[in-house]
Image (cartoon, rainbow, N blue to C red):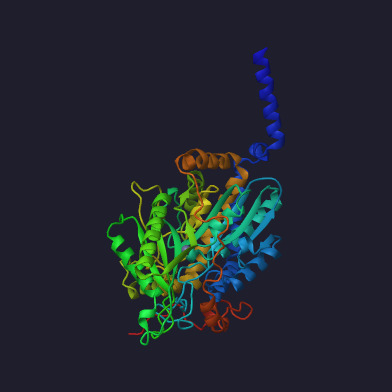
Amino acid sequence: MKKQRIIKTGILTLFLSLVTNPIVQAQTKYSKSFIKKQKANVETLVAARHKNTQVMVDKIFSFAELGFHEVASSAYLTGLLQEAGFEIVYGVSDIPTAWFARWSNGAGPVIALGSDVDCIPKASQYPGVAYHKPIVEGAPGHGEGHNAGIPLNITAAMALQEVMTQNNIGGTLVLWPGIAEELVASKAWFVRDGYFDDIDMCIFTHVSSNLSVSWGQARGTGLISVEYTFEGEAAHSAGAPWRGRSALDAAELMNIGWNYKREHLHPLKRSHSIFTDAGDQPNVVPSKASIWFYLRDVTYEGIMKMYNDANNIAAGAAKMTDTQFSSRVVGTAWPRHFNKVIAETMYQNIQKVGLPQWSEKDQTLAKAVQQEVNSDTTNGLATALSELGKPAAYPVSGGSDDIGDVSWKVPTVTLRFPSNIPGLQGHHWSNAIAMATPIAHKGATAGAKVVAMTVLDFLTQPQLLAQAKDYFVNVQSKETQYKPMITVDDPAPVELNTQIMQTFRPELEKYFYDETKYDSYLEQLEISYPTLKKD
Ligand SMILES: [Zn+2]
């Protein structure tokens, strides 16, 4: 009797899950040969879109917009997505340039495709020219290569739309931008505000010099970005200096205090600061001064310990100078953890797609740039694929990316795609040189193929998504629980970079790429590719 009831309940549960769970329903829907055929199909469709990809990559490069000011970039990209039938939410998390775009082909997995879009201060640079030649002197430029990632994602999404509609493959695609990634100041806000709540998995793309993916704790750090502001009393610096209390003295002492602290930081930790307000002129004792820190470590706990230490040092500096201090969190990034199942699935597609065929001109440019910046790497562009990245035996320090916060919310990987030259220092004009040339265009097409094929894998094989979620819940999140570094009230610091963009936007606008007149941005700028340094 008891046994019968268990069987009955079992059958009922199975029946209910078949009816209510599209994932289970879909389990037998797609044959291996169908999946193989559609993956080949989507790869061909991405290749056929190469011209569109080139135009998008060149357009975003020419806009050269800093974080929170991706106005032209966001208007252009959302325009394309709207035309393709995506529904768009603008002004996400009270960030004017942020948006989420969604297109659905019925029940199925909800897969997000993200990438950054902002650029780097003072990195303006002619593409295809192997030495420092700014388009606009002192202006921002794509010296990180964030101009190629969203064009890659859009290319993949549009190829997927064709395959999904023609073959009735259910699922939803959500495209979104990493706004102000260089300030690590949007993704934690998107997570906090629920934009990933109904998303099953996320594929993030980031420019690199190879086609690669990794799983487990990523090499590099997480960080908290904090600005400390001191307030004192102004006075005539010569007439009555004894009546002044210098906020700048406090900011300087905080910096000195932190630099003493630095000796006792574990080598995995990294920190850097700039003064954002150091007074107005020497004859006025500064009543206000600010210093801005990035505090990095490989664990959340380590980051928060540094934050606590910095607060103590700020309090000490205020006490020494009889000033007051306040602080605000302006950016956060969790250390990244990437999904094993998505990475392994993606790596099979990476092997199928392989690296682009570089021309002799591409290689000549790459080698000349490597020589120009005295790189250790001198053999040009990558011609052999990287291995699948696995967790390092010991944590490795380095940079951060706020995709970390997303990676603790939903199963996530970052596809690194080969649109740039190996061996450059990063955040530098040299990193912009390749980013509106055939190197960037081919790298984005290769990446778009991998993304489209991987999305198809997860749309058509629900067991893969179940395994990815199992890794996320039972392995990744087993010992570590995500705690946001921002509170519910912290606004994104959208006013940052305003002055720089006000200064340079009118000049930059003169160089926006007009695809109706010129085949490529190189053509518009009258650059013969590649241009090497004259002896
Ligand atoms: Zn980046």
Q: Which one is in front, 315 or 206?
A: 315
Find residue 415 and report its horizontal and vertical position in percent: 49, 56
Q: Is residue 15 shown above or below 88?
A: above
Check the image and name the residue furthest to the top: 1
Determine which quarter of the picture holds residue 33.
top right
Q: Is residue 383 visible?
A: no
Q: Is residue 415 visible?
A: yes
Q: Is residue 258 shown above or below 501?
A: above
Find residue 519 and report its horizontal and vertical position in percent: 58, 77
Find residue 65 and report its horizontal and vertical position in percent: 54, 73
Mark count = 0
- State left or right for residue 270 relative to residue 19: left
Check the image and name the residue furthest to the left: 263
Q: Which one is in front, 281 or 525?
A: 281
Check the image and name the residue furthest to the bottom: 239
User: Looking at the rendering, in which quadrant would you find the C terminus?
Assistant: bottom left
Identify the residue at image location x=48%, y=71%: 435
User: Looking at the rendering, in which quadrant would you find the N terminus?
Assistant: top right
Find residue 38 and report its horizontal and vertical position in percent: 62, 50
Q: Is residue 55 shown above or below 489?
A: below
Q: Which one is in front, 62 or 276?
A: 276
Q: Is residue 373 shown above or below 100?
A: below
- State left or right for residue 187 relative to residue 395: right
